[in-house]
Image (tube, rainbow, N blue to C red):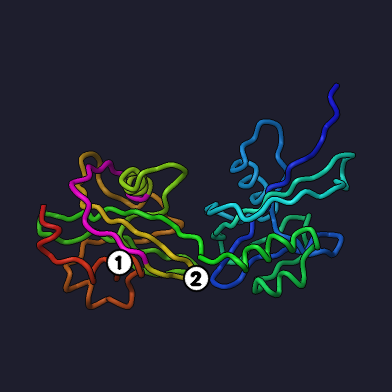
């Protein structure tokens, strides 16, 4: 039998605004959440499983980019080395704040500098690397502008602990998706309908909550199904709006919808 050379742990540096999440384990040490690779798991599967086990009310995880990999010379659980791989990530939680498994006793949202002072020595390098990264991680998103026979635009109303806003259906790209593929998938997940892309409208890079986002909007039409709210834990209403009506509720619109309105003219979305 071959000797096991090392174990692999996948950790998430979860960012919210300018702060990152740290958790205190039952030994009293602060760390970042995650888990060890098990069997034939992929990195993404390991991280998702580890986060769900340690933060049971986590509901949306987006892995953004690798930050650093560190080899710890001795794994305290086995006679082997431990390689820790750190990823930059975002997450949302039921009730806004995380709940903890029995493995941890407390959590804090802290600045990156505070995290360096508080966490395990073996984690400090990853946080320092994150601090020194020259550019924020870019998120790529895409959405579909769907209109009715009068040219009104369909918006969803997000109603969660963190956000209450009207927004164009859409979301983050997954893995190797193209923007048009992501836009079609997100509409299916959020509205339960299949759409056909008519054309790309506009795209824009902008900042929101400490992230740099690149959003692409497509004009699309429903080709199968009837639009409804498929994710009631996130959305509580849907409605068609004219441009004038959206301007009247401008403060209730999501940043991406505000950006779209500033760039588009009514004739641009004529089908």
Percent x, y of residue 85: 68, 49
From the viewer's perspective, tell me whether residue 250 is left or right of residue 206: left
Residue at 75% across, 66% down: 106
- Indicate which label's residue lies in the foreground, 2 or 1: 2
From the viewer's perspective, tell me whether residue 145 is left or right of residue 59: left
Residue at 21% across, 52% down: 219
From the viewer's perspective, tell me whether residue 154 is left or right of residue 122: left
Going from the N terminus, do you reach mark 2 or mark 1 first? 2
Q: Secondary structure at mark 1?
A: helix
Numbered circle sitting on residue 257: 1
Residue at 28% across, 61% down: 155
Residue 61 visible to the viewer = no
Give the magenta-colored segment's residue range: 190-205
Magenta stretch contains residue 195? yes
For label 2, the residue is 210
Percent x, y of residue 235: 39, 59
Residue at 82% across, 64% down: 29
Q: What distance separates the C-alpha of mark 2 from that of mark 1?
A: 18 Å
Percent x, y of residue 43: 62, 41
From the viewer's perspective, tell me whether residue 206 is left or right of residue 112: left
Residue 123 visible to the viewer = yes
| Quadrant in the rendering for residue 264 | bottom left
């Amino acid at each position: 039998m071959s000797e096991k050379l090392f174990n692999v742990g996948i950790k998430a540096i979860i960012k919210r605004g300018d702060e990152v999440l740290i958790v205190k384990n039952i030994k009293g040490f602060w760390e970042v959440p995650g888990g060890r690779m098990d069997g034939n798991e992929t990195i993404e599967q390991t991280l998702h499983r580890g986060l769900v086990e340690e933060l049971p009310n986590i509901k949306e995880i987006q892995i953004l980019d690798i930050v650093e990999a560190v080899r710890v010379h001795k794994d305290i659980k086995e006679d082997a080395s431990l390689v820790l791989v750190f990823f930059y990530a975002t997450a949302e939680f039921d009730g806004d704040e995380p709940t903890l498994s029995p493995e941890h006793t407390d959590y804090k949202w802290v600045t990156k500098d505070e995290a360096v002072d508080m966490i395990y020595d073996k984690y400090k390098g990853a946080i320092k690397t994150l601090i020194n990264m020259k550019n924020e991680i870019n998120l790529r998103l895409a959405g579909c502008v769907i209109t009715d026979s009068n040219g009104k635009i369909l918006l969803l109303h997000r109603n969660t602990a963190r956000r209450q806003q009207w927004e164009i259906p859409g979301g983050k790209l997954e893995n190797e998706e193209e923007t048009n593929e992501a836009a079609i998938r997100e509409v299916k997940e959020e509205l339960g309908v299949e759409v056909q892309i008519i054309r790309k409208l506009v795209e824009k890079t902008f900042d929101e909550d400490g992230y740099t986002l690149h959003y692409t909007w497509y004009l699309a039409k429903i080709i199968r199904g009837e639009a409804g709210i498929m994710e009631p834990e996130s959305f509580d209403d849907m409605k068609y709006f004219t441009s004038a009506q959206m301007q009247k509720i401008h403060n209730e619109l999501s940043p991406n919808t505000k950006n779209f309105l500033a760039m588009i003219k009514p004739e641009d979305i004529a089908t």
